[in-house]
Image (cartoon, helix red, strand yellow):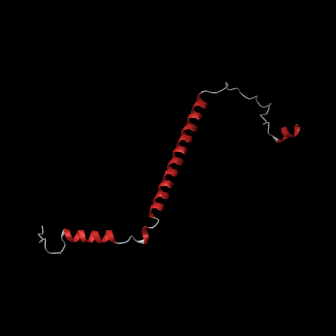
Amino acid sequence: MRIVRQDRKDGTMDDLDDRLAGLRAAPATARFDGLEEAVMQGLDRRRERSVARRSLMLAGVMAIGIGWIGSTVPAQPAQAAPGPLLIGMSDYAPSRLLER
């Protein structure tokens, strides 16, 4: 620990107080112009991303829920489609489409 006499100006608290007072009296630099606006715009962008993220999560949860409910509770009982004719020809085969 270093003991410094109070009447000397070689790194005492008085020197620090004088330097801080000088900084307080000095004009602000031009780098700080528009700083507040830039910070507020950044906060707005962050808030918008947060809202968008929550909206997407809500839409995803709703889609999963609706799909799950729709798969467990069908609206009508399942019915088999009418089977193909003798050779298993599709209704969309070219020969079937040309008959119509």
Q: Quadrant of residue 73?
A: top right
Q: Which one is in front, 54 or 48?
A: 48
The residue positioned 76% from the left and 29% from the top of the image is 83
The residue positioned 88% from the left and 37% from the top of the image is 99
The residue positioned 37% from the left and 71% from the top of the image is 27
Q: Is residue 48 left or right of residue 6?
A: right
Q: Position of residue 11 (x, y in %)?
A: 19, 72
Q: Which one is in front, 21 or 61?
A: 21
Q: Is residue 42 left or right of residue 15?
A: right
Q: Position of residue 22 (x, y in %)?
A: 29, 72
Count of numbered tags: 0
* Looking at the image, residue 2 lies above or below residue 50: below
The residue positioned 56% from the left and 34% from the top of the image is 65
Q: Position of residue 47 (x, y in %)?
A: 49, 51
Quarter of the image that includes the C terminus: top right
Quarter of the image that includes the N terminus: bottom left
